[in-house]
Amino acid sequence: MLLWFAALSLVLVALVFDSPNLDYRVVVLGAVLPVAEGTVGGPWLLHTLPFCVVALFAVMLVARGRRLAQRRWLGVPIGLFVHLVLDGTWTRTEVFWWPFAGVGSLGGSSVPEFSRWPEGLAFEVVGILVALWVWRRYGLSDPSSRDALVRQGRLTGVRS
């Protein structure tokens, strides 16, 4: 389930923040990163709220005084937060609130995004439809708009 997280994180963050300076590539990276925990018997830390909060503070602390670096890397924790919403991790109290809801609840099971079949396939279809909508809404058929997204992470196309 990559398209579900990639397309919807891009749309949700673009519509909520509407920031021309946010690097949407990094937001998408943060949103799809927890899917990798499925390959190591997750869910692990990337599916927990405390990790997302620590990641947010780490970006602000490490890049303190460097506003451009903060603006770029702030997309990772934002994407992580969006992932928690989109995959329904918030419904699994023991994982979402780890370690406050118990320390032995990570690993050893499937990540939420891989445990929902055939619904997961429907989510991917929705992700494709949302990606097509993004393509049209932000004018990504225009090479300059597409180039701005690929090279700079910006959505510069026509917003109708």
Image (cartoon, rainbow, N blue to C red):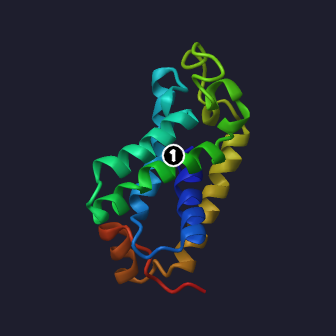
Q: Amino acid at mark 1?
A: Leu
Quarter holding the C terminus is: bottom right
Residue 20 x/y as whole percent: 43, 76
Q: Say which quarter of the image contains residue 55.
A: top left
Nearest the viewer among 77 and 43 is: 77
Q: Where is residue 159? Give x, y as percent.
A: 55, 84
Q: Residue furthest left?
A: 66
Residue 109 drawn at (x, y percent): 60, 19
**Which residue is at 50% across, 42% downward?**
53
Tell me where residue 127 appears, x and y as whole percent: 61, 56
Q: Is residue 128 above or below residue 102?
A: below
Q: Is residue 7 positioned above or below 159 on the image?
A: above
Say whether residue 154 is left or right of residue 80. left
Q: Which one is in front, 33 or 128?
A: 33
Quadrant showing the N terminus: top right
Instruction: Report which residue position mark 1 lands on.
Output: 80
**Label 1, residues with CA under 10 Å away: few <14, some 14-19, many ≥20:** many
What is the tally of numbered marks visible in this picture? 1
**104 or 133: nearer the viewer:** 104
Under circle 1, the secondary element is helix
What residue lies at 70% left-to-right and 29% top-to-bottom? 92
Residue 42 visible from this viewpoint:
yes
Mark yes or no: residue 31 visible. no
Query: Which residue is located at x 65 percent, y 36 percent?
Result: 89
